[in-house]
């Protein structure tokens, strides 16, 4: 295996897989963003079971979107941590 990339000259290193923190942020953010569309459509109250319906719906949507969150968090982690120079020196 080469020590550096032949195209961009980035040094290869073992992946540390630290994208879990970004995935956690995306998941929590999605749970709160569900309020933006759920509250105007159905409303959330404490006098009935609508809060539980919201939590169940929000959890189901977040679990369904989790494969995309995993990929997106990995890509964002790489964008934030790996320096890419498009010009060869």
Image (cartoon, rainbow, N blue to C red):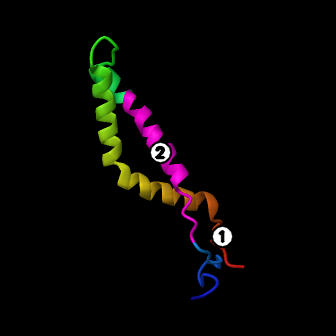
**Does residue 51 lie above or below 74 as drawn?**
above
Q: Position of residue 55 (x, y in %)?
A: 33, 30
Q: Nearer the viewer, residue 89 or 14?
A: 14
Query: What residue lies at 50% left-to-right and 60% top-to-bottom?
Result: 75
Residue 88 percent coordinates (x, y): 67, 78
- Secondary element at tag 2: helix
Residue furthest to the top in view is: 47
Q: Which residue is under mark 2?
A: 26
Q: Nearer the viewer, mark 1 or mark 2?
A: 2
Q: Secondary structure beneath disc 1?
A: loop
**Which quarter of the figure is the C terminus placed in?**
bottom right
Residue 26 on the magenta span: yes
Measuring from the top left, give residue 18's x and y in whole percent. 56, 59
Relative depth, front residue between 36 and 44 = 44
Name the residue furthest bottom.
1
The answer to whether residue 57 is above or below residue 85 is above
Assign the magenta stretch its main secondary structure.
helix
Q: Which stretch did the figure color magenta?
A: 15-35
At horizontal 54% and vertical 63% (from top left) the residue drawn is 17
Report whether 21 appears left or right of 62: right
Q: Which residue is mark 1?
A: 85
Position of 78 relative to 5 (above/below): above
In the picture, the quarter occupied by the N terminus is bottom right
Residue 8 falls within the magenta-colored stretch: no
Count residues near mark 1 (Cα–Cα under 10 Å), then give few for <14, some for 14-19, many for 20+. Answer: few
Mark 1–mark 2 distance (CA, rounded to whole Å): 28 Å
Q: Quadrant of residue 56?
A: top left
């Amino acid at each position: 295996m080469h020590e550096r990339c032949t195209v961009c000259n980035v040094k290869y290193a073992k992946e540390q897989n630290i994208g879990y923190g970004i995935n956690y942020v995306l998941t929590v953010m999605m749970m709160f963003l569900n309020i933006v569309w759920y509250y105007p459509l159905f409303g959330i109250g404490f006098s009935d079971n609508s809060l539980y319906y919201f939590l169940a719906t929000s959890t189901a949507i977040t679990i369904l979107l989790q494969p995309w969150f995993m990929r997106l968090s990995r890509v964002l982690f790489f964008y934030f941590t790996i320096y890419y120079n498009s010009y060869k020196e």
